[in-house]
Image (cartoon, rainbow, N blue to C red):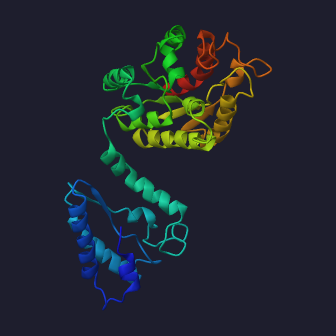
Amino acid sequence: MIGTNNTGHRKLEQESPEDTVAGIKAILDKLGQKAPQSKVLLLAIFPRGATPQDGCRVRNEKVNAEIQKFADNKRVFWTNINGKLLQPDGTLSKEIMPDLLHPNARGYDIWAQGITPFIEKTLKTSVIPDDRLGEGWWKARFEQKQALVKQGGWELVFMGDSITHGWEGSGKKVWEENFGGYKVLNLGYGGDRTEHVLWRLDNGELDGYQPKLLVLMIGTNNTGHRPLLQETPEDTAAGIKAILEKIARKSPTTKVLLLAIFPRGANPTDSARVRNDKVNALIKAYADGQRVVFMDFSKEMLEPDGTLTKEMMPDFLHPREKGYGIWAKSVLPVIKDAVGR
């Protein structure tokens, strides 16, 4: 996006809209020469000035009317999000652009939301994440789950890492007893971190169906597999927030039951436990109580002094059947309310 300084810093007799259009075309031509394989998302110049009659706004709109013709939908693509930045009457609010030119955080958020679908579509790839390339089981599981996804009609989805994956192991009996009456899909993958879930969402795991409820727990591999200097609780929480935002875009009618990361380590002072607790305190704020509901039943898995026993989690990470029973009992009321039975 370029051109507002041409119209704003030069008088009309110094530079006409046609001159600005020619400059933008020259940029597109040069990009085509230097990066012929790159796609270009050409944005309309943002609105400028308080009213539609503002001189710079009028000149920008004349430029926009012409440069959109440069889009061939092969290499150059056009997007105009100006309507989302303006009030219904066409005025520009200082709550979006305080100086009637530069967006504030709210304005940049509108910009991000406006172009994210194009970015996701353009960057979508079928390449397995680099750190999963050597794990044939992960690719096989992804392909198996994709085949199930394409069947559609799933009412209930569990998404996460090995703890969710474990519903097919230690939790299998509990799963069948409690969720057997629902069309339910397990999208848990051992070892996954937040970035892997984001990759899976980008590559089809919520395509073609709108589950009524998605149960999400992710993050323990972020805190357990990475030193604090590499990833802070704030980083992990940001990854979880990105997952929630992506679910909202891909499946806007789906309710999300966001679970606190389960306790990890034998004692409350275990470093991974402490980091998980910090993440949980942050992600709780992402729940609005309607589309996203937060639930934390960790204490039911712990002893009164906060310790974790091997009877509950043999490796202090993955639950036994008893732990899956606590999980099922805790989430069933939300499932019944969301699914309607």
Instruction: State whether residue 31 is above or below residue 333.
Output: below
Q: Residue at x 47, y 74 (%)?
A: 101
Give the residue furthest to the right.
Answer: 305
Q: Say above or below: 222 vs 10.
A: above
Residue 89 occupies quadrant: bottom left
Q: Is residue 316 left or right of residue 143?
A: right
**Nearer to the camera, 111 or 143:** 143
The image shows a total of numbered marks equal to 0
In percent of the image, x 30 and y 35: which residue is there?
126
Figure quadrant of residue 20: bottom left
Q: Position of residue 28 (x, y in %)?
A: 25, 66
Using the rendered view, name the quadrant where residue 136 is placed: top left
Residue sticking out furthest to the bottom: 13
- Position in image of residue 163 (x %, y %): 54, 21
| Residue at 67%, 22% in the rendered image | 265
Give the percent coordinates (x, y) of residue 70: 21, 66
Residue 105, image x, y percentages: 54, 61
- Is 267 displayed left or right of 272 in the figure? right
Pick whichever, 230 or 276, lies toward us. Answer: 230
> Is 33 located above or below residue 244 in the figure?
below
Residue appearing at x 57%, y 20% in the figure: 332
Image check: 127 left or right of 25?
right
Q: Quadrant of the N terminus?
A: bottom left
